[in-house]
Image (tube, rainbow, N blue to C red):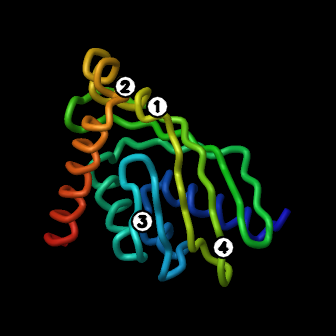
Amino acid sequence: MNDQNAVLIRTFYDAFGRCDPDAMERCYHPEVTFGDPVFQELEGRDRVMGMWRMLLGRNRDIGVAVRDVSARDHDGSAHWTARYTFGRTGREVVNEIDALFRFEGGLIIRHHDEFDFKHWSKMALGRPVGLFFGWTPMFRATIRGRAMRSLEEFMNVG
């Protein structure tokens, strides 16, 4: 166990839970990459932090809890829970997420989150939509496209 990297992971999620993107950003390497089922691959601290700033700006009621933090010299993992209201529908979401990390120079250079997209879509969009369409590639592509357009708009305005 690398205690410094474990503290870095906890620091990131503590800042996230406080809706403090500046403190989150200090945990990331300038060349960080991020991926998850919605924002598949984002490169560079500006784009990755753009995503977090956009999400925090839309979800001021977000709750973040992290557990099972594990870190070695070059990699680490954690399980975290996000609780928030999905803006488009007003529905409550409780998303269980597994995170993987790579470290370089005492900072996070790779962050990848994995969660059950179909389960998320049922919570965020409602049972009929999520149940019948949450598993389809076309539905996932639509959600991903909307998310990326929102990020581009957010970054162009900011």
Of residue 135 and residue 77, the one placed in the foreground of this image is 135
Of residue 57 and residue 145, the one placed in the foreground of this image is 145
| Amino acid identity at mark 4 | Phe
Q: Which residue is mark 3?
A: 21
Is residue 48 found left or right of 128 in the rendered image? right
* Mark 2–mark 3 distance (CA, rounded to whole Å): 25 Å
Evaluate if marks 1 and 4 touch, with contact meaning CB atoms under 8 Å apart: no
- SS at badge 4: strand
- SS at badge 2: helix
Q: At 28% from the left edge and 55% from the top edge, which residue is drawn? A: 57
Quadrant the N terminus occupies:
bottom right
- SS at badge 1: strand
Q: Which residue is mark 1?
A: 94
| Amino acid identity at mark 3 | Pro
- SS at badge 3: helix
Mark in the foreground, 3 or 4 = 4
- Which of the labelled discs sits on residue 103, or is there none? 4
Evaluate if marks 2 and 4 touch, with contact meaning CB atoms under 8 Å apart: no
**Other residues around mark 1 within 10 Å, as few (<14) / some (14–19) / many (≥20):** some
